[in-house]
Amino acid sequence: MTKFSWKGYWQTTPLMFRRIGDALLGIFSIVSVSSVITEHKDLAVVSLIIGIVGKILTNFFSDNPEPTTPEDQQD
């Protein structure tokens, strides 16, 4: 089960959320660079901030292992 929490930042991020975060950062970085080239500075700053915040927010997701009972464990 995936959980969003403050403590989740220091735990391993699930693969799906890592991919989403990397995609957000990549897309908004490209938009930011193209905005600088076309001299739309405000759009460049906003898109870069959105990409960075999106990447950071995905780090707060973590996998919570299902609690195991002694009956579930096999010797």
Image: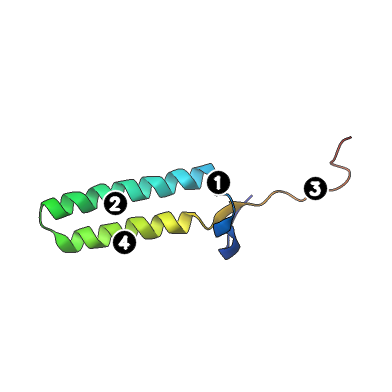
Residue at the spot of label 2: 28
Q: Looking at the picture, which amino acid does disc 4 mark?
A: Ile
Tell me what residue is drawn at x 57 percent, y 57 percent: 10
Circle 1: residue type: Pro
- From the image, tell me which residue sits under label 3: 68
Residue type, label 3:
Thr
- The percent coordinates of residue 19 (x first, y second) are 44, 43
- Residue corresponding to mark 1: 14
Which of marks 4 and 1 precedes in the sequence? 1
> Badges 2 and 3: C-beta atoms under 8 Å apart?
no
Secondary structure at numbered mark 3: loop
Q: Is residue 23 left or right of residue 18?
A: left
What's the CA distance linking mark 4 and mark 2?
8 Å
- Residue at the spot of label 4: 49
Q: Nearer the viewer, residue 52 or 20?
A: 52
Q: Earlier in the sequence, mark 3 or mark 4?
A: 4
Label 2 and label 1: CA atoms lie apart by 21 Å
In the image, is 41 to the left or to the right of 20? left
Alpha carbons under labels 1 and 3: distance apart: 20 Å
State which tag comes first along the sequence, 2 or 3.
2
- Give the Cα separation between the discs numbered 3 and 4: 41 Å
